[in-house]
Image (cartoon, rainbow, N blue to C red):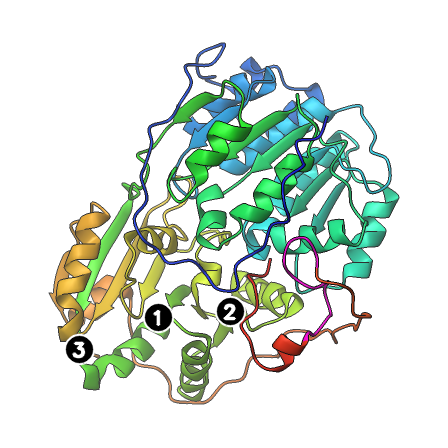
Amino acid sequence: MNRSGHPPLHLPDTEPSRSAAETVEPVGSAGPAGPAETFDALDLPAELLRVLARRGVRTPFPIQAATLPSSLAGRDVLGRGRTGSGKTLAFGLAALARTAGREAEPRRPLVLVLVPTRELAQQVTEALTPYAQALSLRLATVVGGVPVRRQAQTLNRGAEVLIATPGRLADLIERRLCRLDAVGVTVLDEADRMADMGFLPAVTAFLEQVPGGGQTLLFSATLDRGVDQLVRRFLTDPVSHAVDPAAAAVGTMEHHVLHVQSADKNAAIAHIASRDGRVIMFTDTRRGADHLVESLLSKGVKAAALHSGKSQPQRTRTLEQFRSGQVAALVATDVAARGIHVEGLDLVVNLDPPVDHKDYLHRGGRTARAGESGTVVTLVLPNQRRGTARMMSAAGITPVTTRVRAGDPELTRITGARVPTGVPVTIPDPVVERPRHHRATARTRYGRPAAGTRTSAARAGAPRPPRG
C-alpha cells in the first residue's frame, strides 16, 4: 500500500539557510552478524564475488563490512560515514544481490537510488555497472541537463535499478514516464546534501509513493537538517552503523592555511595551478570560476570550469578531460564538492575559505579517498583569518598556518607551485548538446514546471528551484 495522501509538495526556489539544526544520535542496534572480514564471508551471489575478485577487491572497507550483513539480510540500514568511505558498494552490492533474478516492467524500477547531484549519479552508475551486468540487471540514470526523451526511452525498455537526482525524477513522475509502485529497495545516498539543497520535500514525496514493506538504506554524514525526520518516518527498526564521526576529517589528509595578501593572491593561485599534477580549486561563484579559468589559460595553465551553469554533457566532458590530464586545474563551485571521484588527486585548494565547516570537509573529501593521502590548502586574506579559525575549529581541524607569496619555497613545498609558462593555451570546448524544447505543461505537484517549460516568472528572471 502506498504511503501517499499528503498535500502537494513544493521545492523551494532558493537553497535554504544553513542554520544549525538539532543532531540526534543514530538509532538501532548491531546487525545480525558482526562485520565481515572478506567479501567471501558475505552471502553474495557468486557472480558478484567473481567481479570483485577480478577487480582486485577482496577486503571490504569498514562501512561495507559493517552494513552489508544487515542490508543483505533485508534490514533497513542507517549508515554514517565520511565521503570517500566506500558507501557506493556498501549499498550497491546489497541492492543488486537482493534484486538478482528479477525483471522490471517498463517504467517500474525495482530499486531506487536517490543522490543529490548529477556527478554523484554518474559516479554511482559507473561503480555499479560491472556488478549489475554480471547479474543481468539493467541500470537507468536520470539527471537534469540531458534530454528527457532519451531517459524515458531507457525506462520504457525496463530497468531494474534507477539512479536519479530528485529534480529530474520529479519531472519523469509528473509526466507519467516513471512509477515507484514496484520499488522494493530504496537507497538515499548523501541524504544530508539533499537536505542542504532543499530536496527533502521531494524525497518525502517519493518515499510516500514507494510501497510499504520494502527496504530502505539511508547513508548520510550527519543527521541534521531534517534527515533525522526521514529516518524516524521511513526506516523501520533500522540497524545503525557509524564507522566515522559525523563530520570527521580524514586522517591521511594534511590541512594548510596559507596567509596571503590581496595584491599577491592571483599570482599565488596561478603558481599553484601550474604545478606538476592535477588540482581542484574551489571558488564561490560561477562567474568567478569562469574569469579565473580565462586568466589561467592566458598564463599557460590548462584549466577548465565546472559549475551548474554548464550543461550536463559539458560537465561530463570536462570531468573526462580532468581525469585524462588534458585539464590540469579544475576550477569548481560547490556543485563538485560531492560526487566527484578522481583517482590519484592529491591537492584541493579553497580559493576562499568556506563559511560552513561541512562545506570544507566535503570539498576536501575529493582527495585522500580510500586510504590515499592528500592535501587541502585554504588561501586566507587578512580580513578572513578570524572567520577561518572558527570554521576550522568547528571542523575539528588544526591546520598548519604559513605566510606565503608567489615564488616562495614554502608555497612550492606545500603545493608543488611553480611559475606558469606565460604561453597561452586553449582547451577544446566540451561537446555542447542543443537543448530540446517541450510543450508547456501545468505546474507539477513538486512545485516546478516540466522540463523545457519557461513560465512567465522564469522569463522575468525569477529564481528557479534546485535542479538535479
The answer to whether residue 52 is left or right of residue 244 is right
The kind of secondary structure element at disc 1 is loop
For marks 2 and 3, give the one nearer the viewer: 2
Question: Picture coordinates of residue 350 (x, y %)?
Answer: 31, 65
Label 1 near label 2: C-beta < 8 Å?
no
Mark 3 highlights which residue?
Answer: 405
The kind of secondary structure element at disc 2 is loop
Q: Is residue 359 above or below residue 461?
A: above
For marks 2 and 1, give the one nearer the viewer: 2
Q: Which mark is residue 275?
A: 1
The boundaries of the magenta stretch are 444-455
Q: Amino acid at mark 2?
A: His
Label 3 near label 2: C-beta < 8 Å?
no
For marks 3 and 1, give the one nearer the viewer: 3
Residue at screen point 52% across, 29% down: 233
Q: Amino acid at mark 3?
A: Arg
Q: If you read the primary sequence from the N terminus, does the residue marked by circle 2 or circle 1 appear first?
A: 1
Q: Is residue 286 above or below residue 242?
A: below
Q: Which mark is residue 307?
A: 2
